[in-house]
Image (cartoon, grey):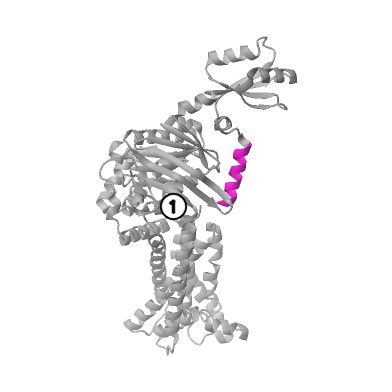
Amino acid sequence: MPADIAVRTDAVTKSFGARQVLRGLNLAVPRGSVYSLLGPNGAGKTTTVRILATLARPDSGNVRIAGLDALASPREVRSRISLTGQHATVDAALTGAENLRLAARLAGMARADARRRADELLAGFGLAEDGGRRAGTYSGGMRRRLDLAAGLVSRPEVMFLDEPTTGLDLTGRQAVWQVIRELAASGATIFLTTQYLEEADQLADRVAVLDGGVIVADDSPGALKRQVGGSELVLELAGHDSFDVVLRRLGRRVLHSDPAAQVIGAATEGDGPAVRALLDEVDPDRRMVHRFAVHDVSLDAVFLALTGRGVAAGSDLAQEETCNV
Amino acid sequence: MSELTTGRPGAVAGATALGRGLAMTGRCLRIGWRNVDAVVTSLVLPVMLMLMFVYLFGGAIHTGTAYKTYVLPGVLVLCAGFGSALAAVRVCEDMTGGVVDRLISMNVGGIAILAGHVIASVLRNLMSSALVVGVALAIGFRPHASPAAWLGAAGVLLAFILAVSAVSVVIGLLVTSPEAANGCTFVLLFLPYPSSAFVPVSTMPSWLQGFARHQPATPVIGSIRGLLLHQPLGSQPGLALAWCAGITAVAVAGSAAAFRRRAARG
């Protein structure tokens, strides 16, 4: 394996009973990059992270982490990685500082070193003033930052973050993003899973889209979004005739349509001139479009464009996963 | 931020299984002391139980000796059940949240995780036991025991506490929610009642006597009573230790299997 690849999987498969979750996963994560695995609930993101973090074994295929064979030497791999899962793993009854000291002690540090490391991390994650408070009193965003900090006690080469901002409000999400950006700037390799295109867009150098247990796209966020347009223009039409006309005029730019509600979603660049031009093009007489709204393009839209399947398929997958966890 | 990720990597190399086990024990104890339930169960409940049995029921129960003298071993065993039940809930919380994944990814294995819970439980219970004995002495329990007999009684109690703590850990590993863990520990709490803990077995209906005479709590209670009151022991200490060792062995083996199964899920 070339020295500049931090995480590589070759033809990894994993089934739970009759359900095949991963069907030949191939990943190559450049060292020092932020790599995002994007997919809906149930796509196999968590299974992938568990395999990469040595918590689960694939049925077949190879996994190399930080230059080591993860299947043959999981213990060595574990000493070079950290995992921050979907659920906060800090102890609510312990203070922020105690949580970090415990993590450092478990990593084998002497008491004084653990104390120093905890203080260092609290300061680095903007928690210095809250280190003496119980983690149970923290906001969601603070707790997640503490969780990330706990993963850093032994200076991992590769960090796995499984949906690091799921369940956080906007402020919390932005604070976590800031932390991840700073970690990336320091040179760590970061592998993160997310359901949010925007998150991948904000953080990742490279985005892989996981669908049906295989990678269906692997590119920079910009390139992925260009495939579907940067935003989505949602049009509410004035009647059935208008709906049909506009649908025809939009052609391949239609992301989704709902005849009953007379609503069409169309791909657009999203800025003023582009939206104006599109509206003028499909409705030159300004009679057919009743209302409109512009949204950032959704993961569903990217998914539809990449896989030809929409939201419904994603939800089915989500249900399957729930049944099998 | 660069100082957070760069610098010497691989500090894990210095971690020993013993060090990790001690760190996990410290964690369990610390979390326990910050939980109102745990503090009440460990400190208030033992005192309440001792006083309740002596002053509420004691007057109506005739055992041939002063009830406070008769009932002490039973209260000790009952408190061991209550105290150990906490471990089931804690273990289940660790297994069902993301904690176990994080710990395994840090190379902290099942032995350190579970040993931490068991040792913390044993230490908590020893303290509760000391409290119960203190209350008993304060209200007039007067044992006839040499220091060696005291030590022997403490040893039998320790073996029992270890066994129920280990069972509690298995329960925590087998159930899928902390609430269920809490519910399933009733076995530990009820075990002392159909035994010689609170009333002589001879006062029970005959069908119950068979169970009461041959269940593990009875020789444990008999041994502690015999040692503290300088009564004939017979085969009770041997039986008590055999029961405790057997239960602990089965529980440890069950924990190992259950932990592997749970940790490998998904």
Count of numbered marks: 1
In the displayed structure, would residue A133 be above or below residue A175? below
In this view of the protein, can residue A88 be seen by the observer? no
Report whether A235 appears left or right of A274.
right
The image shows residue A21 at horizontal and vertical percentages of: 54, 47
- Residue at 62% x, 42% y is A316
| Quadrant the N terminus of chain A occupies | top left
Please tell me which residue lies in front, A257 or A177. A257
The image shows residue B90 at horizontal and vertical percentages of: 46, 59
- Residue at 39% x, 80% y is B153
In the displayed structure, would residue B177 be above or below residue A172? below
Question: What is the magenta range?
Answer: A312-325
Q: Which residue is mark 1?
A: A55
Report whether B187 appears left or right of B117.
right
Is residue A322 inside the magenta stretch?
yes
Amino acid under label 1? Leu
The image shows residue B173 at horizontal and vertical percentages of: 49, 61
Please tell me which residue lies in front, B62 or A77. A77
In the displayed structure, would residue A18 be above or below residue A41? below
Is residue A240 inside the magenta stretch?
no
